[in-house]
Image (spheres, helix red, strand yellow):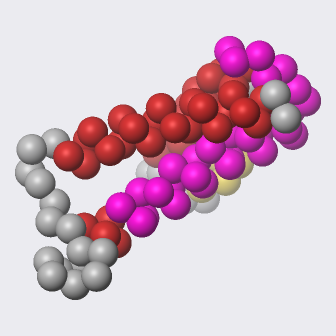
Amino acid sequence: MAQVTLRINGYAYTVGCEDGQEAHLQSMAEEIDQRINQIRALGGQSGEARLLLLAALLMADELHDLKAELAQMATPPGQAGGAVAKPDGALLKRLDQLAARAEVIAERLAHA
């Protein structure tokens, strides 16, 4: 088992992972750090635990929306709630909308 030291919000965290997964784990940590930087840029200066919580909530919200979007796209046409995926970048457009929504949520949470 490999060990990786991740830097998130200026703090070092050493975690274990399967051999060969180090780069993937580092990439995920960078994503979390990016979310924390977005929250801080909106004036959400808080303690470490709160920043990690807000970043996790943002990511969980996006994941929830993406799962719902994929479930809707998987429903055959003609069934309730069904939609046909368009190969013209509709999913990418939706992902951009979700990212913008996450920024709004982060701002609201930061001022809560």
* Membership of 51 in magenta stretch: yes
Residue lying at 36% horizontally and 42% vertically, measured from the top left: 95
Q: Position of residue 78 (x, y in %)?
A: 15, 82
- Regarding residue 12, the answer to whether it shows in the image is no
Say which quarter of the image contains residue 67.
Answer: bottom left
Q: In the rendered view of the protein, which quadrant contains the N terminus?
A: bottom right
Residue lying at 66% horizontally and 21% vertically, measured from the top left: 37
* Residue bounds of the magenta highlight: 41-69
Left or right of residue 98: residue 103: right
Q: Position of residue 18 (x, y in %)?
A: 54, 59
Residue lying at 85% horizontally and 35% vertically, measured from the top left: 112
Where 79 sits versus 67, above or below? Answer: below
Question: Which residue of the protein is positioned furthest toward the right in this rendering?
Answer: 47
Where 45 sits versus 28, above or below? Answer: above
* Membership of 67 in magenta stretch: yes
Left or right of residue 86: residue 75: right
Left or right of residue 16: residue 70: left
Say which quarter of the image contains residue 66.
Answer: bottom left
Question: Which residue of the protein is positioned furthest toward the bottom in this rendering?
Answer: 79
